[in-house]
Amino acid sequence: MAALAGGIVALVLGIILIIVWWAYFIKALMAGVPILLILGGALAAYLGFEEVKDKRAAGTAENTSSNLKHEVETLKEELKELKAEKKAPEKTEEGTDN
């Protein structure tokens, strides 16, 4: 209940003071808006730059991933061939021993 009463008092006092100090309020806006625009623009530029860097890194990672997948497939095929070659001579040796 105290928070409600305090909120209502602050609201009424704020409305009264903005009317009484309207000129100072406008001056504060005139001083604050350019600063907010500069800081907001700098933040937006920084975030845009980071996004571009992330996209470049993702593209490089995608290419690297693609290359690695191709290399893994090639190595799997080579391993299968080596296993097949290893099994083939064993069968021929067994056949010659008999």
Image: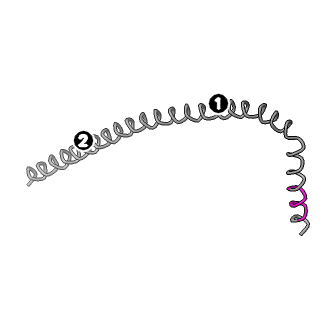
Foreground pick, 89 / 80: 80
Where residue 64 sits in the image (x, y, percent)?
Answer: 39, 36
Where residue 35 sits in the image (x, y, percent)?
Answer: 73, 31
Prevailing secondary structure of the magenta residues: helix
The residue that label 2 is drawn on is: 78
Foreground pick, 17 / 68: 17
Q: Which mark is residue 42?
A: 1
Which residues fall within the magenta stretch? 5-11
Where residue 94 sits in the image (x, y, percent)?
Answer: 13, 52
Q: Residue at x 31, y 38 (%)?
A: 71
* Disc nearer the start of the sequence (1/2): 1
The three-letter amino acid code for the residue at tag 2 is Glu
Magenta run includes residue 93? no
Q: Residue at x 60, y 35 (%)?
A: 44
Foreground pick, 71 / 29: 29
Q: Residue at x 13, y 48 (%)?
A: 93
Q: Residue at x 22, y 43 (%)?
A: 82
